[in-house]
């Protein structure tokens, strides 16, 4: 996109390495489940496997409320924002696009994807 060409192997590497911050989120979720399960303070009815740790806005919302708003709020995840910025930096370094333009392009494509996914999720429920 944006009139540049990046080889597929480079794109695959950028996307793969930009997803590494999600490992930290998975580790935090695992710790949350283990600590909550051993201390007995984990409320099994209130626990949501989609949001085990307060890393996004949807953690503080009712999952049975507005499905579209819940889906969009789950998109605002600190680790996803970190990954999107890393992806934009990777594309900027491997093309002739400015860093800000690359980051905003990646963010806009992600938000369009989340709008469609949240809309479909709300329509199917």
Image: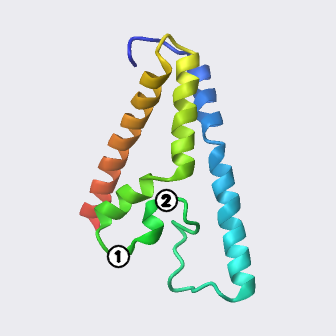
**Relative to residue 48, is residue 125 drawn left or right?**
left
The image quarter in which residue 104 lies: top left
The residue furthest bottom is 40
As drawn, 97 above or below 120: above
Q: Quadrant of the C terminus?
A: bottom left
Answer above or below: position of 72 versus 15: below
User: Which numbered disc, 1 or 2, marks the residue that appears first in the sequence?
Assistant: 2
Query: Dot 1: what SS?
Result: loop
Question: Would you call the spot at circle 2 few (<14 residues within 10 Å), some (14-19), or many (20 or more)?
Answer: some
* Residue shown at 55% from the left, 31% from the top: 87
Q: Which of the 4 image quadrants contains residue 101? A: top left
Q: On the rendered structure, is 48 left or right of 10? A: left
Q: Which mark is residue 56?
A: 2
Separation of marks 1 and 2 at Cα, in angstroms: 17 Å
As drawn, the label of residue 93 is: none
Colour scheme shown: rainbow
- Report the number of numbered marks: 2
Q: According to the image, label 1 marks what residue? A: 64
Q: Give percent across and percent down for residue 124.
A: 28, 64
Q: Residue at x 38, y 16 (%)?
A: 2
- Which is more toward the observer, 33 or 120? 33
**Residue 78 on image: x %, y %:** 54, 51
């Amino acid at each position: 996109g944006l009139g540049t060409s990046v080889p597929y192997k480079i794109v695959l590497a950028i996307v793969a390495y930009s997803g590494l911050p999600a490992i930290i989120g998975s580790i935090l979720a695992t710790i949350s489940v283990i600590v909550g399960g051993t201390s007995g303070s984990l409320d099994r009815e209130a626990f949501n496997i989609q949001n085990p740790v307060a890393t996004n806005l949807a953690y503080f919302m009712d999952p049975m409320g507005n499905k579209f708003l819940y889906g969009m709020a789950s998109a605002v995840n600190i680790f996803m924002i970190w990954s999107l910025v890393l992806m934009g930096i990777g594309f900027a370094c491997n093309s002739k696009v400015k860093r800000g333009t690359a980051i905003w392009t990646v963010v806009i494509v992600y938000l369009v994807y989340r709008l469609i996914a949240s809309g479909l999720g709300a329509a199917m429920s």
